Image (cartoon, helix red, strand yellow):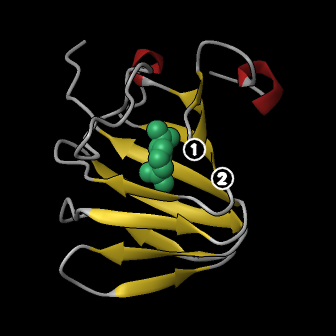
């Protein structure tokens, strides 16, 4: 059984801070669950291009306001209680009007080191 607190992850190597987001990665590939689970902050006033070509991701907003624009598709507003699931590897722009706090689940699980490349893609890291 695995028991952790967010405080165990903050400022550890599993706390990944970028210009537009800060992912606190609570469960990763090495935890053997078959998915990874992150408590992620999207910084206020930012826009991030994201394209999970190799992963599916579910995102559940628990704080803040923003929107997701699917490239070539619709724009959806995000507020606490909004869930979006990228089951079609949709390329998208994520915008935070205020700071967003999101619970993110990835399959396959992230290994921990991934950050987006210039196309918004995370590499598929083989364990
Ligand atoms: C919502 C989203 O995809 N944000 C980017 C960071 C990612 N969720 C992560 O690595 O935790």
Q: Which residue is mark 2?
A: 43
Left or right: residue 7 compared with residue 37: right
- Mark 2: few, some, or many residues within 10 Å (few <14, many ≥20)? many
Answer with the quarter of the image where residue 23 lies.
top right
- Ligand 1 closer than 8 Å to label 1 CB: yes
Name the foreground residue: 8 vs 78: 78
Residue 8 coordinates in the image, percent (x, y): 77, 19
The image quadrant where one finds the C terminus is top left
Q: Residue at x 69, y 60 (%)?
A: 44
Q: CA distance from mark 1 to mark 2?
A: 6 Å
Which element is circle 2 on?
loop
Left or right: 115 in relation to 25: left
Which residue corresponds to the image point at 44% horizontal and 85% vertical from the top-left?
76
Looking at the image, is 13 positioned above or below residue 125? above
Q: Which residue is mark 1?
A: 21
Q: Is residue 92 above or below residue 17?
A: below
Residue 32 in percent (x, y) is at 41, 21
């Amino acid at each position: 059984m695995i028991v952790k607190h967010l405080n165990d992850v903050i400022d550890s190597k599993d706390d990944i801070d970028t210009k537009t987001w800060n992912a606190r990665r609570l469960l990763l590939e090495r935890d053997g669950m078959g998915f990874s689970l992150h408590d992620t902050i999207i910084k206020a006033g930012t826009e991030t291009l994201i394209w999970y070509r190799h992963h599916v991701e579910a995102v559940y907003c628990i704080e803040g306001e923003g929107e997701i624009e699917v490239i070539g598709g619709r724009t959806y507003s995000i507020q606490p209680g909004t869930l979006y699931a990228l089951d079609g590897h949709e390329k998208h722009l994520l915008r935070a009007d205020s700071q967003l706090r999101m619970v993110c689940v990835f399959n396959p699980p992230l290994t921990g080191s991934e950050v987006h490349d210039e196309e918004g893609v995370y590499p598929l890291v083989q364990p």
